Amino acid sequence: MSTQPASIERAPGRRWLNGSRVSAYCATILVVLQCYGLVLAVRSAVAEKGHPAGWDFLTFWSAARLALAGHPLDAYSADAIKHVAQQLGPHIILPGPWFYPPNFLLLVQPFGFLSAPLAYALFASISSVVFVLLVRRALPIPDMIMWIVAFPGLWLNAAQGQNAALTASLALAAFLSMPKRPMLAGVFIGLLSIKPHLAILFPLALACAGMWTTFIAAALTTILFTTVSVAVFGLDILPVFLHGLHDANGFTASGSLPWFQMASLFASLRMAHVATGPAYVAQACQATVAICAVAWVWRNAKGLEVRATALVAATFMISPYIYNYDGVWLGIPLALIAARALRDGWLRGEPAILFFAWIYPQLGNQLAKDCGVGVGPLVFALLIFVAVRRARLEAAGADPSR
């Protein structure tokens, strides 16, 4: 007769610690750590700098206040932005300049009615929640929800007070709408004119895929959005905005905008002491490869996840003005490829590549700052590889599970 209690003898028949629960517990721990880190960042910023975390949002808020005061052109003046920010406290760390188009100024203008901390909290939380809900729709697997919430890109973006969760939500909403609501997809793409360099490849992709309804809807939305913005702020805002782009390019080339926070090949090469000219040439070569990859994938592949992965990765390979906080966009291919792979099978190396892309926003800044190594271009190249390989298999009618 066994001397073990009956409850122990029956334990193997009702295992509670399975792989699904281990995964959920690990993700939950990561979420708690991310929350703790964000709380520390907010407390430290308030104590030392006079404002909550989300330093970049202070630029948005200051520009919104200037627009509400009837001086929208002053949003493009670094001195005017700093003057507004200084009203928050004597020890405030002055924000960076405003380089965004009038479309984004129109979007953030209502936040100027609120106090800076409240405006930041609403902007960061609403955009993050919307992105999580959209990713949840793309990856409708219960075990994945905590991994979605724990995605480091979301927390880096929230800590810096940036708009990457908003732009990524628009892009993902566009992708999810393309199969059945092409006009709505075009509207979402047109709204991405708030940050034009992130939407630059959509026209090429849509043309290569023959998605003309979405193409026209995106063009009309962009024109209408821009027209309304110019009507509100005045025609003079356009040359001021274009002059600001010239300044942004100069700051990027000189390092006035920190290279270690950037994800582009140009920034990685400049950190490695490569001269400006050769770094731009390398960036242009990479952009050419990215453009060709997007054109080929959108022409030959039909799967949404393959097309979206190629476009997101290539978008990050086009512009030298890409930041690590923009890594929220990586959640799009992560969710779509994972959903496809869990349904049809993984290809060799894909889990490792996706994990590398998942953790990249957390490590990108630190690796670049401490080691002077920018790994962003490698992440984006690997995602292009994932998309092209799946597109080739799809075109050949091969089974990806083999």
Image: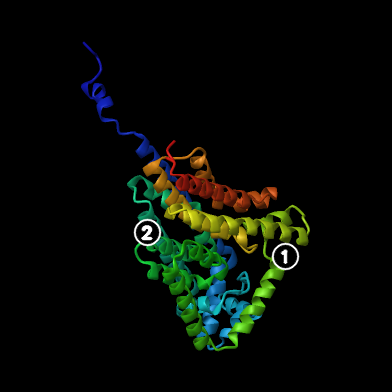
Label total for image: 2
Q: Name the residue: 51% across, 75% down.
A: 104
The numbered mark at residue 208 is none
Q: Amino acid at mark 2?
A: Leu
Which image quarter is the N terminus in? top left
Residue 243, given in percent of the width and then of the height, sits at 67, 79
Q: Is residue 106 left or right of residue 343?
A: right
Which sits in the foreground, 313 or 62? 313
Q: Name the residue: 72% across, 63% down.
A: 255
Which image quarter is the C terminus in? top left
Is residue 248 placed above or below 328 in the rendered structure? below
Which sits in the foreground, 191 or 146? 191
Is residue 159 placed above or below 379 in the rendered structure? below
Q: Secondary structure at mark 1?
A: helix
Check disc 1 and report the residue beneath it.
253
Q: Is residue 52 visible?
A: no
Residue 21, given in percent of the width and then of the height, sits at 35, 39
Q: Amino acid at mark 1?
A: Ala
Residue 69, given in percent of the width and then of the height, sits at 52, 87
* Distance in Å between CA atoms under marks 1 and 2: 37 Å
- Residue, far top: 1
Residue 195, given in percent of the width and then of the height, sits at 54, 70
Is residue 379 placed above or below 161 in the rendered structure? above
Q: Is residue 356 left or right of residue 148?
A: right
Cβ–Cβ under 8 Å for marks 1 and 2: no
Q: Is residue 33 visible?
A: yes
- Residue, far front: 396
Q: Secondary structure at mark 2?
A: helix
Q: Is residue 340 left or right of residue 97?
A: left
Check disc 2 and report the residue beneath it.
133
Return the disc, 1 or 2, that comes first in the chain's sequence: 2
Which sits in the foreground, 107 or 221? 221
